[in-house]
Image: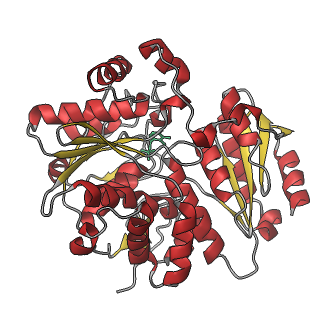
Amino acid sequence: MAIRYYSTNRNLDQVPGITPFKKYVTFREALLQGQAPDEGLFMPEPIPSLDLARVMALKGRPYAEAAKMVAHTYLKEEIGEEVLDRIVEDAYNFTVPLEKVTGRKYIMRLDQGPTASFKDFAARLMARLMSALRDRGQTLHVLVATSGDTGSAVGDAFRGVEGIGVTILYPREEVSGRQKKQLDSIGGNVQAISVDGKFDDCQNLVKEAFADSDLAGLNLTSANSINFGRIMPQMIYYVYAYAQLAEPGEDIVFSVPSGNFGDALGCEYARRMGLPVARLVMPVNENEEFSRYLETGVYRKISPSIACLSNAMNVGHPSNLARFFDLYGGTVDRTGIVHAYPDREEMKRRIYSVSITDEETKETIRRVYETYGVLLEPHGAVGWKGLESYLETNPGDRLCVCLETAHPAKFPDEIEELLKIVPQLPSSMQGIDDRQGEAIRLPSDYRSLKEYLLGRR
Ligand SMILES: *Cc1c(COP(=O)(O)O)cnc(C)c1O
């Protein structure tokens, strides 16, 4: 049966201001539209199944083989296998180390891509899928606002991709020197714009551009984290890790440091596709709205969000929570209002979540390095500490994999302060401080952005 995509808001008939989108769309439409017209998130139906024998046959095989298998289950109706295989091989030209920590416990390092964060995995495949699935001869224009890592992963992923131009807006005073370097120097079809304003100003400029019919000829599209095209690639590394490490018939625990829940959602889908995941551990930092919900049954977003060391997880209302609620029979909207609660008991059987403080994060970085010689940065440390917390109530030497989502060299100050060592830059990031490239400076004013975009066409 062909996979189609529905909106998480499809049942909100009685809610003022929402006109539920009740149709189904294809992967291509979900990818190019980003979100449903009712501001809900697209969900696949039915969820396809994996053949576990074929998964086990991936043992010892390159990552791209796992990626082909998963991508093919979602896309076989929409892209020919040869084309898809070429896209996948081009996207995944780096390694995915599985590092043993102790016993049956591993760290999976998702930091070997060009911008050294796990966001490379999703952005690189999505960029190539957009290029392949656009109308023949059509040029798309990706417009994104960023406060840091997402922008560089997305910008780098689209570099040189045919038929797509990219404009990245960032707040001049709110990105670090190294982040600015990364954004400004991508080059080619990717242009950075440094805005005199805050991240929210950048986001508002982008929203205004999407609503402006004068720009219809530009084929503007977004590449943000709620796009299903960024979720599907995040299922692959769970399948890959299981195939490399599991004995036949064994089950596995994954720990996924979580912010907007897109990464963990990849694991949730992988389980629903048949991967034997015993429990999905979703540690969060001090933004504990989800762990508190599992405990109390009441969901309340945290606004404004709390600034923690694991800064990519400073999220007070995870954008992909709507998908988790939907999968367990509930509905929550973009603003954080719960219209129907999900089956919390079932959720707790499958998911374990815990809030990790900054103090615990630092203690974990220090202790894991001293005890096992394994280097973690703050996001991975939240993941590891969350796994330890889970194992306190669920002891045993079962197979566990904790995801490390960024390279420690992206946090040189924290690592040096805690461990008195300076982490080596990964090869992808060496020479970053010498790269050339200038951002275009714009005031925080829509007319200037519009003029720029029309001129770029
Ligand atoms: C984005 C990000 C996360 C959080 O991932 P979500 O999919 O938003 O839960 C964790 N770690 C790093 C380094 C990130 O960049």
Could you tell whether 171 is left or right of 276 in the image? right
Query: In percent of the image, x 66 and y 76: which residue is there?
Result: 134
Say which of 204 and 237 sits in front: 237
Could you tell me which quadrant the N terminus lies in? Answer: bottom left
Say which of 120 and 195 sits in front: 120
Query: In percent of the image, x 32 and y 35: which residue is there?
Result: 383
Q: Count the marks.
A: 0
Can residue 297 be seen from the camera position used here?
no
Percent position of residue 54, x then y: 27, 74
Can residue 364 be seen from the camera position used here?
yes
Percent position of residue 258, x then y: 38, 41
Query: In percent of the image, x 40 and y 50: which residue is there?
Result: 263
Say which of 399 and 395 sits in front: 399
The picture quadrant where one finds residue 404 is top left
Percent position of residue 108, x then y: 35, 45
Could you tell me which quadrant the C terminus lies in? Answer: bottom right
The picture quadrant where one finds residue 366 is top left
Could you tell whether 336 is left or right of 389 in the image? right
The picture quadrant where one finds residue 47 is bottom left
Which colour assignment does the render follow?
secondary structure
Percent position of residue 135, x then y: 68, 80
